[in-house]
Image: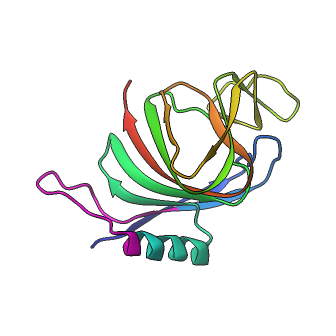
Amino acid sequence: MRRFCITFAGGLTLGLAAAAVLTAQIDIRQQAPLDRAVDFPTAEIDEIIADMDAAGRVTTRLLEGGSYNVNIRRISNAETALMHPRTTDVYVVREGSGTLVTGGQIVDEQGEPVDGTRGAAIRGGSERVIGVGDVIYIPAGVPHGIRDTEGITWFNIRFDTR
């Protein structure tokens, strides 16, 4: 199995209300095959999550398919408020819980609208607690972020729809 690593570094805003510097790594486990199915047994997922914890990595890309991908996301506190202009997300929560905020408007630390895809918070969004077993569909263009969590792990299936 070939593995790739992409590193993003910069002053990204973490949390829906707090700012921090992020150095995140996305470990790409394999390219999505076009000629066969791929299985990820529970034991392998458990090993991947243990590796993520050891490396301090919040995202592992199980499959990379260009306009689509399958990821494991694991955070221990709030994440950046964000929006994907072309990409739809489907979340399947594996463990933990948090408050998911969707819709509304992305704003900066002063509550001013952001001209972009990331910010400090979402103003006017819909909030609900998500937890183990929940499945969430977030269309392209809809702001979203998770806050009020002490830890949550989910499968994130992403595909371009615009």
Q: Is residue 73 at least partly visible in the picture? A: yes
Image vertical order of residue 91 relative to residue 104, above or below: below
Q: Is residue 32 magenta?
A: yes
Residue at figure coordinates x 36%, y 48% from the top left:
69
**How far across and how far down the image is residue 67, in percent?**
33, 39
Q: Is 129 situated left or right of 61 in this image?
A: right
Q: Is residue 80 at least partly visible in the picture? A: no
Extreme residue toward the right, this view: 110
Q: Is 48 situated left or right of 11 in this image?
A: left
Residue at figure coordinates x 51%, y 49% from the top left:
133
Magenta span main SS = loop
Q: Tell me the quarter of the picture where residue 33 sits.
A: bottom left
Q: Is 12 situated left or right of 132 in this image?
A: right
Coloring applied to the structure: rainbow
**How far across and how far down the image is residue 27, in percent?**
45, 65
Image vertical order of residue 96 relative to residue 99, above or below: below
Q: Is residue 120 magenta?
A: no
Q: Is 158 situated left or right of 17 in this image?
A: left
Q: Quadrant of the C terminus?
A: top left
Extreme residue toward the left, this view: 35
Of 20 and 17, the residue lying toward us: 17
Residue at figure coordinates x 29%, y 48% from the top left:
65
Q: Quadrant of the N terminus?
A: bottom left
Of 161 and 131, the residue lying toward us: 131
Residue at figure coordinates x 44%, y 29% from the top left:
86
What are the residue bounds of the magenta stretch? 26-44
Image vertical order of residue 158 relative to residue 5, above or below: above
Q: Tell me the quarter of the picture where residue 2 sits.
A: bottom left
**How far across and how far down the image is residue 49, in percent?**
51, 70
Of 131 and 104, the residue lying toward us: 131
Of 115 and 145, the residue lying toward us: 145
